[in-house]
Amino acid sequence: MTANAFQITTGSQEATRALGRTLGGLLAGGEVLGLTGDLGSGKTCFVHGLAEGLEVGRNSWVRSPTFTLINEYEGRVPLVHVDLFRVAQGAEMEDLHLEEYFASGSVCVIEWFERLDAVGVDEFLAVAFRYVDEDRRELRFAARGRRYEELVAALRRDDGAARDRAANAPVGPERNEA
């Protein structure tokens, strides 16, 4: 694995969501995240966590924009969630005016990123999802650009700290010896 990439396997939906929450807490606005993976591989679950990390209101219904194409949410930083699954290349893609969202300072998350025509996205964080089994998902983060390399490094540090916490966690019930 290169310095600009990071791979992790999550063991549950909550772990996938928590990873999204961690990344959301690191984002400052203006980032583009490109999500790829089959249906059911955990993309929308991850975006739920991302929204939590961006402090999107608890009353917001974060859902896949498969039919609406674009959902916008207010939070610490605005979140724009795009789903290109049903969008045809060419004029239909151009009609979305995604470049305006990219320039808005919002965090832009694009599901089915591989379908995106070149519209001025030179730097981004690619997140590839792979279904392992009913509970587990493999996520591979690949940075394209300095800001995204920093995000990958932060995720790698957080994963190491999480592994250390798990290794040092008490095995049985904690006892207070006085």
Image: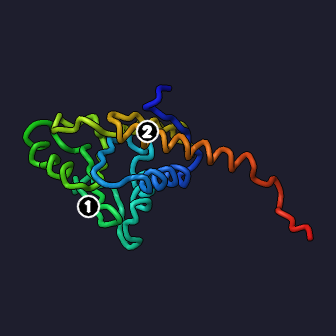
Q: Nearer the viewer, residue 53 or 111?
A: 53
Residue 17 rendering spot, x and y as whole percentages: 49, 54
Left or right: residue 173 versus residue 65 is: right
SS of the residue under disc 2: strand
Residue found at x 49% / y 35%: 6
Which mark is drawn over residue 129? 2
Left or right: residue 43 versus residue 94 is: right
* Amino acid type assigned to the residue bearing label 1 in the image: Glu
Whole-angstrom CA distance, mark 2 to mark 1, is 23 Å
Residue 175 rendering spot, x and y as whole percentages: 86, 65
* Amino acid type assigned to the residue bearing label 2 in the image: Phe
Residue found at x 12% / y 49%: 97
Residue found at x 45% / y 32%: 5
Question: In this figure, which residue is indicated by the disc labeled 1?
Answer: 72
User: Which quadrant of the figure contains the C terminus?
Assistant: bottom right
Residue 77 rendering spot, x and y as whole percentages: 32, 61
